[in-house]
Image (spheres, rainbow, N blue to C red):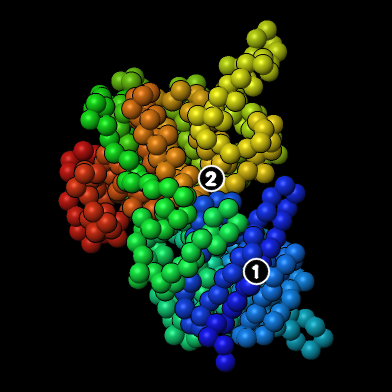
Amino acid sequence: MSEYILEARGIEKSFPGVKALDKVDFAVRRGEVHALVGENGAGKSTLMMVLGGVYVPEAGEVHVDGKAVRFRSPRDSIQSGIGIVFQELSLVPHLSVAENIYFNRQPVKLGGRIDRKRLQQLTTEMLARFGITHISPATLVRDLSIANQQVIEILKAMSEAPKIIVLDEPTSSLTEVEVARLFENIRRLQNEGISFVYISHHLNEVFEIADSVTVLRDGQKVVTAKVADVDEDFLISHMVGRSIENIYGSRAADAPLGEVIFQAENLTREGVFRDVSFDVREGEIVGFSGLVGAGRTEVARSIFGADPLTSGSMTLDGKPFCVNDCARAIKEKVGYMTEDRKTLGLFLDFDITQNFAANRLGGYVKHGMMCDGDLCFVSEQIVKDFRVVTSSIEKKVRELSGGNQQKVLLASWMSIDPKILFVDEPTRGVDVGAKWEIYQLLRNLAKEKRCGIVVISSDLPEILGLSDRIVVMKEGRVAGILDGSTATEKSVMKLAIGSGGEEDGNG
């Protein structure tokens, strides 16, 4: 019996003008969690697509359980024992949880009709196996949060009884508590002999859950090592080809906080959040933390005018601030960068220039005509300043990597010269190099433009690393506000789950 449950040998895959995989070797031992890391464009997703039967490589071979296999379709991969959870959810929104988990594999009665009772029973057992009691098999997927949809995507792969499960950014929409639950389930399945390929930009997760790690860069394997033998600096330097120290940066000594620029008092949206109060100073980065469903995003959307407030008051620059639509908020120089860049944030079929201009078209109009020359000049400069990797400003945004899409989205909001900017999950699904660049952009915006920034994030190390103060929410209320310089993961989580903690009196 082979030591490895999965082996990819000398895999090569090219696209027009790009060598996506160049003689890549990758092997996973039986019962291990093997992390696969690298910047966007390193080849991780392409390798996963090869293993999943989506792409057919030009060279190389794949072995599963010691036997050579050749995948001509995703079904071939599944039948060989590989289950893949893609980063981009593949669920059908208008079908139920049960119908999605057992999609195209529903139990049937004589005559070919779906056995609804059996389907319900199988799904209930699958949910219970992983300790999920808050989701009904009959619930439509479209009615679930992004986090719960991701849980269902994982259960869908697990229901195929695979030998190897590939998880591509599985925690991008999960809270710390949900990540811990996922890891418990991974370890449980490991004990049953299932192996995992764990693809993630969160290196802290790699060190917590993985046994081995492989680094890809520019389509080539750089190194494979035991996780116990390396540290974060080792992985980052091999991923980006250079050393990055203190990825979150720090407040410059010459950039003290200014006066309060924005204040919210007792904001309430009936049934969603209640009596939310906080303030933001000039040049300050305020983090919003809490479990999924705590109300963080909902508060930001209401301040921005996307959803109505029931009661409460706000001031901006010391003057009453009240908006009921997003266009008005933008005119007042209040921005909101959504967590869902592909559905709500970007115009994927428009080019980079059009996306840059989307939030302030009026700034490029003279005598009723668009000043294309001015817009192109500004776009070229923004591409340079934001380090957007692209061959042209006329490239469609959907053709960019996740990190570059995120930088385009951030640039479009910086273009309104905001007084206060809400950024929701600013680094979701981007690599460590792009994260560092986004953090620098946010810090420069706070320092140079004196913008007040509110960072909403499920990534607790990100919140702790960036924030001057941290607003912790629980069940639609502010559970406490912590000083960023002294806050810890423990102190934030104690407030988030309601097991104690002290409020510092700032809101």
Dot 1, how many residues are within 10 Å of its Cα: few (below 14), some (14-19), or many (20+)?
Answer: some
Q: What x and y, as percent, mark residue 446? A: 35, 29
Question: How far apart are labels 1 and 2 at the CA level?
Answer: 28 Å
Q: What x and y, as percent, mark residue 208? A: 36, 68
Whether residue 111 is visible to the viewer of this picture, yes or no, is yes
Whether residue 208 is visible to the viewer of this picture, yes or no, is no
Work out whether mark 1 precedes mark 2 in sequence or the reverse, and give the earlier one: 1
Q: Is residue 241 above or below residue 48?
A: above
Q: Residue at x 53, y 86 (%)?
A: 3
Residue at the disc numbered 2: 403
The image quadrant where one finds the N terminus is: bottom right
Would you identify the image quadrant in which residue 166 lies? bottom right
Count of labels in the image: 2
| Nearest-to-viewer mark from 1 and 2 | 1
Q: Is residue 377 above or below residue 63?
A: above
Tell which of 202 and 240 is nearer to you.
240
Please, what is the three-letter code of the amino acid marked with disc 1? Answer: Gly
Tell which of 152 and 352 is nearer to you.
352
Q: Tag 1, which secondary structure?
A: strand
Q: Is residue 360 above or below residue 178?
A: above
Q: What x and y, as percent, mark residue 135? A: 50, 69
Q: What x and y, as percent, mark residue 351? A: 68, 33
Please, what is the three-letter code of the amino acid marked with disc 2? Answer: Gly
Tell which of 68 and 95 is nearer to you.
68
Residue at the disc numbered 1: 10
The image quadrant where one finds the C terminus is: top left
Q: Residue at x 42, y 53 (%)?
A: 237
**265 relative to 122 in the view: left or right:** left
